[in-house]
Amino acid sequence: MAQLSHWLDQRRRTGGLRELRPVVRLGNGRIRLADLPDSLPLLDFSSNDYLALSAHPALMESGQRALAELGAGSGAARLMSGDLLIHHQLEEAVTSLKGKEAALLFGSGFMANAGVIPALVGRGDTIYIDRLDHASIYDGCQLSGAKLHRFRHNDLAHLEELLQKNPADGQSLVVVESIYSMDGDRCPLPELVRLRKRYGFLLLVDEAHGTGLFGPNGGGVVEADGVGDEVDLVMGTFGKALGSYGAYLAGSQEMIDYLLNRARSFIYSTALPPAVVASSLAAVELVRQSSELRDDLWQRVTFFKKCLCDGGLKVDLGPTQIIPITVGASDRALQMAKGLQKRGVFATAVRPPTVPENSARLRFSVTRHLGVEQLAEGAQALLAVVKDFAPELLV
Ligand SMILES: *Cc1c(COP(=O)(O)O)cnc(C)c1O
């Protein structure tokens, strides 16, 4: 097809073509690019496996046991014969973790967002999303057919302006992330729930990057901010800090009863396999049992940021485990990512359209796979490429 090759050529020419790079995991946060077998091992600063749970013995053993006892697949959708007891056990664990009445599992975070939004609103309704909300939220909005307004990132005054300008006849829905995946900053949830009281919208909070890391029980930012009762629905994934795969929505019993009848990505999709569910269950139990893992992560995050500050980087490194170094142009971010690879560090260059024009960045995430030495090494490599390509970011 001429159109296809034209599109691909153009992407290749402008440096915007996405390509897969298989990696081999070597342990201790090191990976090797499988297509360059002789290359240096790289420190992986691009993983969302923040607590290193994907390699935790409790998750692996729990998964192995379920695989041996229950088989590889669940065989059908939940509403057919794929509904296993272990799905309910995980939903109960999530319900406690989130302090909600009920929870519903989804195949992935993408499926949860793409399913829940069209279940809640449709033509005649209005959705307000943060401009930096994840693609799955945006796609859910498109699928719903509701009118969509995007407010400036974390700018609740702008949201309020839009709410006032658009007195919705139908239902209104606001969707935010608790921690933004590419900026690593935090949504001002206490202010947002004050707006919810005034304007009476439904509130959906995506905790993909907050679950397991924030709050006294690892329940997420919603728990940390004490706003659980004022958030109608909390979404989260098992694929990030919880080290497994799959996702959930938590809310009132009525809301969950409704979603299981209306969310098409739940109804028309095979139930998560038992081994994956068992690993997720072990992960939820681990983060609820003690704060040891998150305390350890936050110490590493603080250490990494201190290395960067001490090295003269004068960039706001933000409040979380996700650290964006914004450099502007896409090709600059790409060159810096290549420079980092030469120095043994793998960090992703995030470019438009994932982030707004002229805000291409290197995205560093700190995980418990990286020890003090590796973190110091990563910081030195970053400081060196900043010196080469973006010296204005140094004091
Ligand atoms: C990763 C992510 C998702 C998708 O979750 P998956 O389980 O990976 O499909 C949804 N929302 C946000 C904010 C994310 O970062």
Image (spheres, rainbow, N blue to C red):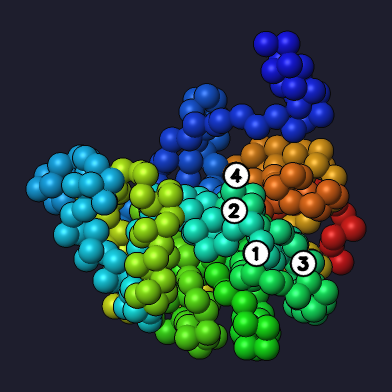
Disc 1 to disc 4, C-alpha distance: 43 Å
State the image coordinates of residue 305 (x, y, percent, origin top left).
65, 68
Rate crowding at label 2 as few (under 14), some (14 to 19) or many (20 or more) other CA atoms within 10 Å: many
Between tags 4 and 3, which lies in front? 3
At 65% from the left edge and 32% from the top edge, which residue is drawn?
18
Disc 3 to disc 1, C-alpha distance: 17 Å
State the image coordinates of residue 144 (x, y, percent, origin top left).
59, 53
At 39% from the left edge and 65% from the top edge, which residue is drawn?
258
Rate crowding at label 3 as few (under 14), some (14 to 19) or many (20 or more) other CA atoms within 10 Å: some
| Tag 1 and tag 2, C-beta contact below 8 Å | yes
Q: Give the quarter of the figure containing the C terminus.
A: bottom right
- Describe the element under mark 2 as helix, strand or loop: helix
Q: Give the quarter of the figure containing the N terminus.
A: top right
- Describe the element under mark 4 as helix, strand or loop: strand
In-front residue for pair 382/200: 200
| Nearest to N terminus: mark 4 or mark 2 | 2
| Nearest to N terminus: mark 3 or mark 1 | 1
Q: Amino acid at mark 1?
A: Asp
- Describe the element under mark 1 as helix, strand or loop: loop
| Nearest to N terminus: mark 1 or mark 2 | 1
Residue 68, above or below 10: below
| Nearest to N terminus: mark 3 or mark 2 | 2
Q: Is residue 208 visible?
A: no
Badge 2 is on which residue? 144
Q: Amino acid at mark 4?
A: Phe
Badge 3 is on which residue? 151
